[in-house]
Amino acid sequence: VGYGFSVMAMGLCMFQVFGGGPLPMAAIFYGLRLGTFLMVRNITIKEKAEANKSRDKLPRLKRIPFATNISLFYAFLVTPILYALRSAKKNPIVKAGTAVAWMGALLEAIADHQKFWAKRGNTDGNKFVGPTGLTYQISRHPNYLGEILFYFGLFMAGAPSFGKSAIAWVCSFLGFFGIFTLMTNSTKRLEKAQAEKYGGQEKYDDWIAQVKYPL
């Protein structure tokens, strides 16, 4: 939840300072949508609420180093927006990157809500209920794919403005590399867990046979 709203807050700051634009608007939309979705999911799904409580046992003072590192990571994720807005270059790559970012944000939004409604009301956690249609025909984890596309789009839009700035290149690369690694590792873990839980069920087996790509 904090992750989503942090991205939204940084997008809002850049929107106000630089006078708007579709790139900071993408960050605002992405963060607001994701933060709200995760908050609603945590409130309405008992298992998610219990899982969050079990992770919330670390003493507050010991959370400071972790929180500091996470804050830097979040800042690196949106660094390309800052450079793109500061240079104000009219470059087709900027427009293409912005379009990719919006496409990724919308893909993740649709996929998240598909999964939420497909699983809502399912009392048998060992039964595969999908989703298997729409965005889940593109890849088996389109929400993760959307997140990667969103941040790749931001990196792409900012790259023409980095120039010879080592700080711009390093910070932006670390942000994208970090989220790419997180999403690919999460995909591998989820693929393994789903295969163990749902393997042998006709609906699941038919779906993974039809949709070849995890991402």
Image (cartoon, rainbow, N blue to C red):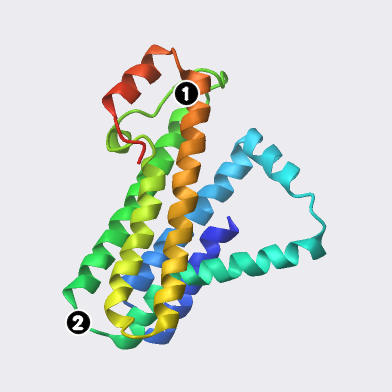
Identify the residue at horizontal 43%, vertical 86% (top origin): 17
Identify the residue at horizontal 79%, vertical 62% (top origin): 62
Residue 29 in sight from this viewpoint: yes
Q: Is label 1 in a helix, a strand or a loop?
A: helix
Identify the residue at horizontal 74%, vertical 42% (top origin): 54
Residue 31 image position (x, y, % from top left): 47, 61
Q: State the quadrant of the N terminus.
A: bottom right
Pick the front one: 53 or 16: 53
Binning the other alpha carbons within 10 Å of mark 2 as few (below 14), some (14 to 19) or many (20 upward) gives few
Which of the two labelled residues, at mark 2 and mark 1, occupies the earlier sequence position?
2
Disc 1 marks which amino acid?
A: Ala
Q: Is residue 126 above or below residue 37?
A: above
Q: Is residue 160 left or right of residue 173?
A: left
Q: Is label 2 in a helix, a strand or a loop?
A: loop
Q: Is residue 55 left or right of residue 111?
A: right
Which mark identifies residue 195? 1
Residue 26 image position (x, y, % from top left): 36, 65
Disc 2 marks which amino acid?
A: Lys
Q: Mark 2 and mark 1: span between their CA atoms?
A: 47 Å
